Amino acid sequence: MIGTRHGCNGQAMIELIVGLVAVLVLFAGLLQVVSLTQARTETMVSARREAGTRAVAANANRMTPDYIRHIQVGPDRSRYSADDANTSANPAQLRNVIINRAASDPSGWTVIDRVPNNAFSALHANPNPISDFGFLNGYDSRRVELIPTIRDLVYDADSITVESEVWMPWTRGMY
């Protein structure tokens, strides 16, 4: 009976295979993270370029972004992801909480309104003051194919879509 172990035949082989699969998944995961990071960088650069081109144009089709009051985390429990929902805020809050405080009291606006080319007066008079900033957006998305190892062993999908959205203020053709 010396040198024989009847209960352990093939255990080393199974441990080797499990270890190789784990190393393969880790290596494939690293490669997948690199490709997703590259796609994220490319979409951010493209969205930024699009928003920047619109921001320096002499004439621009300005947009008004949503006023977001609160983000409600979705089922994936990750903040600011695609399954989250947002609660809209009231545009008057910007005016009441921030803009109105540019004057020490309501009568102070008569003094501010007399200043020529005064942007604060326009903000104060506008019921939707964020529209005076003239925001423009850029957007891009890329579809990243998943490596077969990741697709079959980790994430049951063929691809992941990476999206980027950038908002910039219009410079009114300054450049």
Image (tube, rainbow, N blue to C red):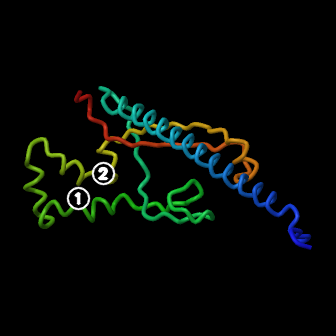
> Cα distance, mark 1 to mark 2?
9 Å
* Quadrant in which residue 173 is drawn: top left
- Left or right, residue 87 beside residue 54: right
Residue at 86% across / 61% down in the picture?
A: 10
Name the residue carrying label 2: 129
Residue at 44% across / 52% down in the picture?
A: 66
Q: Nearer the viewer, residue 157 or 15?
A: 15
- Left or right, residue 75 beside residue 148: left
Mark 1 and mark 2 residues within 8 Å of each other at the beta carbon = yes
Q: Is residue 74 above or below residue 166?
A: below
Total number of numbered discs in the rendering: 2
In the rendered image, the residue lying farthest to the bottom is 1
| Residue 130 x, y percent position in the rendering | 33, 50
Q: Nearer the viewer, residue 156 or 115?
A: 156
- The N terminus: image quadrant: bottom right
Q: Nearer the viewer, residue 130 or 54?
A: 54
Mark 2 residue crowding within 10 angstroms, few (<14) / some (14–19) / many (20+): many
Q: Mark 2 or mark 1, which is nearer the start of the sequence?
A: 1
Residue at 53% across / 65% down in the picture?
A: 72
- The C terminus: image quadrant: top left
| Residue 31 x, y percent position in the rendering | 59, 43
- Left or right, residue 128 beside residue 154: left
User: Disc 1 residue type?
Assistant: Ile
Q: Nearer the viewer, residue 21 or 48?
A: 21
User: Disc 2 residue type?
Assistant: Pro
Mark 1 residue crowding within 10 angstroms, few (<14) / some (14–19) / many (20+): some
Q: Is residue 135 above or below residue 1?
A: above
Residue at 18% across / 46% down in the picture?
A: 119
Q: Is residue 72 above or below residue 124?
A: below
| Residue 121 x, y percent position in the rendering | 18, 50
Name the residue carrying label 1: 99
